[in-house]
Amino acid sequence: GGLEEGRGRGLMMEPVGNAGPEGVVAALGVWGKAAAAAAAAPDPWSLEGVLKGIAEALADGSPQVRSAAGAWLLGLVRHLTAHPDLPPRVGRIQGLFVRMLGERSEFLQEVGAKGLGLVYDMCDDEAIKDQLVASLAKALLASTAELTGKAHSAAAGQVSTGGSEDPLFEEGQVPIDDKALGEGSLTTYRELCTVATELGQPELIYRFLSLASSQRVWQSRRGAAYGFAAVASRAADRLGPHLPRLLPRLYRYRYDPNPRVQEAMDGLWATVAGTDPERTLEDHLPKVLDDVIESIGSRLWRVREASCLALADLLHTGGGSGGGSGGSGAASSVERMAARVASLEERLASILRASLRALDDVKETVRKAGLVLHRRATALAARLCDPAQRGNGPSGEKAAEAALGKVLPFLLNEGLAQPAAEARAASVEQLVKLARLAGPALRPYIPDLSMALLEALSSLEPQMNSYLQLNADKYNVSEDLIERARLSSSRAGPLSETIDLCLRLADEQAADAVGPRLASLIRTGVGLPTRAGAARFASTLAGSRAAAPGLRRHAGRLLAALLGAVESDRSALIRGAMASAAARVASLGGESGRDELVTRLQSMYESQGGDDPATRALVGRACRELISSDVADAFRDHLPQFLPLAYVGQHDADTAAAEVWKELWAEAAGSATAGARLYAEEIVALISRRLESSAWPLRRSAALAAADLSRALGTSLAASGRSGPLLTALLGAAKVGGRYWEGKEAILDALAATAIASRETGAVSGQGATSESLKASGPTADGAVDQVSSVLVEACGLGRRRAYRLGGLRALTTLAEGCKPAGSLGLLRRLLEATRDAFEDDEPTAASSGRPAVSAGRDADEEAAYEVRLEGKARAELREVALRALAANWPGAGANPAADAGAEGGKGDWELLVRWAAPALRHGEAGERMAASTAIRTASLTSAAESETRAPWAVEVASGLWEALAGCATVGSGAGRQAALEALEALVLWVGPEAGRAAGIATVVQEALAAGGDAAVRRAAERLGASVA
């Protein structure tokens, strides 16, 4: 390379070869001087020829040729600034340099940038400078194709005139390519143009181009010979007035996603910031912070990403200034740090807001940068809100409290309300962290913090939980199980931990402020976790010694809200939590509040608990809370109001509800009998009310409680005068003709138990008692038995439900066994008539057994047979119970009226008994055989005791029983054999052994004795043998 003498006046360029940028620069001096000498010649074509040759070389396909041409042009402009023919061609030359900015070679790009700076400095005419600025800006912001076309035009000598079509760009009107980072190689220079335009000084682009260099060639000895250091120094000096507006944007561009832009901006920063970049940054920190925070909301993703990274670096300990001399001493460093902390603390809420916005960005790279920013922002907030890191003593606590006052309101009002799940989760995490660090400084914010966290328990709950509960039936899971799982998950989360921290720190002032808001949240709050959390918060706060005085001022309002939730909430778990909280809150209020609580619980049990066992269990748990917690003393005077509830409630058909009430009764009443005796009046009154209830479960539990009370108190119930009203209420509930309801047979058992208790007192006969007297004081002893027996016999009649008939028969048996001697011939015959169908109707067949339906894999015939078997078992049970009732109610000696004492008296009754008992003895089940044996024994003993002589029809009637009883005496269980042997003994005592039957009976006795086994069977056999003998 080089210029040779023999080649003539034309300046011939040869490629540099593989010498690289250093070789090109080494040749710059030679080429520049040769070009200057040639251009200085008087030939008018020489400068034009050089420019034309350079333009053609810049369009060459060889990178080396284009690099040499760029070096030629740069040397020409650098050494011929005073040439009179050069200024008129500045537009054309600028076009050539602009074209170099689009090259892939970074060296050629920087040659273009240096040349543009020289071109601008060469001009003295301001009009020409304006034209150059407009032309450069339009070229930089055009596409690569447009730029290439402009360069060709420049090479052809067509220069923009800067007319109306080339206006200067106003601030904010410069578009930026936001689609890709790698479109061509103009990104760096376009960004520089943007910075200049945003500053309202488009001409500064030339200063930026003069300073934006990253190639080492310009720092080499040959590069330094061109004097670009001085050019850069002058450019930096001219940028001085614009630093307040320039530095914020320049700092942000240092974190641009494009590495080339970063390098260029780092170079500009190093030059513009001076010898102490850190000090420069600290001096302009407020404006830098404001700019990057605002830019995070830009519509351009590159600006948002760069702003996030820039702000994150500013928040990092030690700053992100890059370079510098390291400050001017420890004192200066402390002052700078204090100033930085003050600036950051002032903008803490804005920084957090910007970081949360970035976490929800549509661009993934921006979200990643936002995550980095959020981590550093939260770390900064934690340091500022931690009293331990703000200094010892009151000053540190005040500083931490002030910082907390900036952060908490933002997180509560905006952070938890962010639409993005990631942003909400980040806010929750930050709240938890700050609450743990703040300690006592958190107290002034407990009302706001606790209410916001309680609401967030539902808003931040995974939507899958609610979906599972709404579709529990699809997954074969109970709603109660899902609710418990949801609450368990909620209580184990960080929100609940922070709420617990608030409860531990709450004092009287905090409780006073939180009371009305808590009541409002309980009334209007939505979501299972929120409502459960509110109930738990109220309960814990009421039990806190420090907070209770403040909450007491709002106990009435809070109790009303809790009771409303107890009565109206759909979830049994929530109602239980609200009831437990109401018990604790009521202990803070006056007597009226406690009265209202107990009254509302009683009302809810009767109004809502009739059809809902969960409600009954809920009221039980609430009452138990009243007497088993630390509020028991406040409710001790109300024991007579809810202990009767416990006595009746422990007979609930629902096992869970019954267990709750049993535990309550055992804990509060002590001895079961003593408690029943103490509260007998209240219990009887409650039972009487419940028997009139429209809810069948309440009637049933009241009837069971009445039976239990009568058996527990016995004679003392009648002696106190309470058996009469109780019996009247039971008779009214069991009135004949009333509709059957499930469990109604419990009333029949209660009637029998109460009548027995009345009979045991030995009161005078009440057979002549009127209905009015019964309503006033209840029936007397014998009158009660007669009335109850009549009701029970009617309950056994044909047409009643089978369960009701069985209940009546069992109650008759109980009554007869408890009132011996009792019974009458009229009662017996009514009972025989009422149970005739059980013994005389035909056995069920496949055609009469009911509806055949295919089930459990059975076909129609098998199903019909199955129905027949079920019906047969039910009829057998009815016969067994009827026989037991007949045995218990067979009239005793002397009970028959004189009119029935004739020779045929009792024969018809015996014939029916034999007709019903004999088949049962031969073909019935074990229980049925035993019941038949017992009935025959009772009837035989009664008949034998009535007269000393045997009735003439006795032998005939008894003839059908000997073989049947003998068969039962030798097979079956020990109890059944014993009953058959005893029946044979009674039969022998009544009719005596017939001729020829003594031997058979003796054989039965021998077989029974030979079988061994039960001692009771042997004794019965021995007694039978003695009777025969």
Image (cartoon, grey):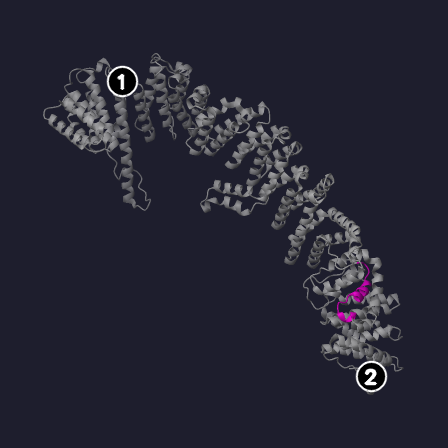
Dividing the picture into quadrants, the one containing residue 1008 is top left
The spot of residue 808 in percent (x, y) is 32, 26
The residue indicated by pointer 2 is 10
783 left or right of 636?
left
| Mark carried by residue 197 | none
Q: Secondary structure at mark 1?
A: loop
674 left or right of 522?
left
| Span of residues in magenta | 199-219
Which of the pair 154/977 is nearer the observer?
977
Per the model, the C-alpha gap separating discs 1 and 2 is: 153 Å
The spot of residue 843 in percent (x, y) is 24, 34
Q: Is residue 872 above or below residue 825?
A: below
Q: Residue at x 71, y 42 (%)?
A: 400
Say what amino acid the circle numbered 2 marks: Gly
The residue indicated by pointer 1 is 824
Dividing the picture into quadrants, the one containing residue 67 is bottom right
The spot of residue 732 in percent (x, y) is 40, 21
